[in-house]
Image (tube, grey):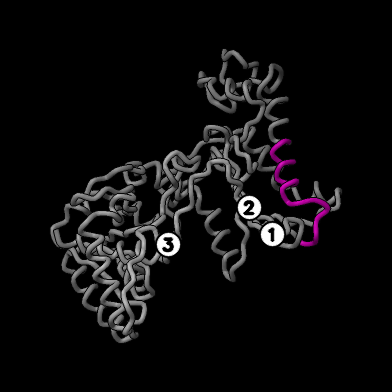
Amino acid sequence: MDKAQGKRRPVDTTRHHRENGWDYRGRAIYHFTLPVEARYPLFGTLEGESADKAFVRLNPFGLQVCRMLGGLAQFYERKGYALKVLTQMVMPDHVHLVIQVLEPLPQSIGAVVRGFKSACTKVYKEEYFCGGENAAKVQGKGASYSGENAAKVHGEGAPVHFARIFAGRGSIWQQDPAHYHERILHAPGQLRRMIDYVKDNPRRLWLKTRNPDLFRLHRRTEVNGLSFTSMGNHFLLDWPDRQAVEMSRSATDEQVEERLRTTMAAAHNGAVTYTAAISKGEQLIARALREQGYPLVVLLNDGFPQEGSPHERYYKPGGVYFEACSKGLLLLLEPCGQAFLDAGIRSAVEETLRRKAETRHLSYVPIPATAQRYRFVALNEIAQRLSTT
């Protein structure tokens, strides 16, 4: 988004999210996300009268999972693992954990995550699923899998479909060949941003649930003869005043500043800005517009989960784009494959590439539409078309 988008990878719904060559037993900081099967709100409910006051009210099972997270480092210390839980968050339907490996581990960090998941499933099975003292804390009174305390987890008279899922699978966690989603924290400042992100989850969920149309992924949105995948405020496409921002990577600071001044002036007068936000100049201008609360339409090369992928249903834009989307100030558009082959777009891209080659006294050699350079130029040409027609 506020960076150049890379090439699209082929669809592979079984691909493990692991870094090749990474030593998962060595010192590192990880952020793990563990979703409940079918994203069922097994741990509690989101409450609060506003986004800033949003919080998760954990049910008894959610509280127990929270305590297990808090005692994770101490439990594994007895097994020779030097760990530190930096932050955690139990959401209604998933768990976030940021954990630091202090010393090389006897086994990979994956063994810790899988052990935690198995322990949670065991607690659920023994205390909240079968009959007995705590069984009714899951399904609701009178449910087919319930006992005396079942309603304390799913509520009085709650549906029992999660219990049926569990009965068929034997795990509370989402089926995933990789067992979990992980992010390794590499860059300076990334830890603070990640901790802030984890703690901000209730507020973000509140905004998303109160503005569902702004976070709905649309396939095959038709605009000016081109097809897109889209998310955000589609009314921005009908805005009468529009402008496109394209800045060469070789633009000087003075040129960027001048373009920023004219772009901000037009936005102040009511124009919606279209940009691919690829070059540093484009990114700077997009960031300034966003920070000032002006509407943006951003063209993406590879911004959305692929159709049919396991992440498609729960996708939401990250970071600052999430905030802009929740306020109705953003529309994300990713052209479908055929849009890059549109005759008008293809002609405009070839003319631009030919002109750039001639400027550098080089012979123009056509490049395929699948090449990253072609697609980046095409995004800017698409932005120009959408902003002028």
User: Is residue 175 or residue 371 the one in the foreground?
Assistant: 371
- Relative side of 166 to 292, left or right: right
Q: Image height check: is 271 above or below 153?
A: below
How far is mark 3 from mark 1, CA to CA? 24 Å
* First reached walking from the N terminus: tag 3 or tag 1: 3
Provide the residue designation for mark 1.
22
Q: Amino acid at mark 2?
A: Arg
According to the picture, the residue beneath numbered tag 3 turns out to be 5
Q: Secondary structure at mark 2?
A: loop
Please tell me which residue is depicted at 41% across the width and 55% down the height of the picture.
302
Where disc 1 sits, the SS reads loop
Q: For mark 2, what is the residue? A: 18
How many numbered discs, if any?
3
Instruction: Tell me, yes or no, whether the two marked residues, 1 and 2, touch with CB atoms within 8 Å.
Output: yes
Residue 104 visible, this angle: yes
Please give the name of the residue rendered at 26% of the width and 70% of the height, measured from the top-left corner: 245
Depth order, front residue of 40/170: 170
Identified at 63% across, 21% down, the residue is 167
Question: Label 3 neighbourhood size at 10 Å, few (<14), some (14-19), many (20+)?
Answer: some
**Distance Cα–Cα, label 1 vs label 2:** 8 Å
Quarter location, residue 360: bottom left
Q: What segment is highlighted magenta in the picture?
A: 102-118
Q: Residue at x 34, y 71 (%)?
A: 365
- In-image side of 10 versus 322 (left or right): right
Gap in angstroms between the C-alphas marked 3 and 2: 20 Å
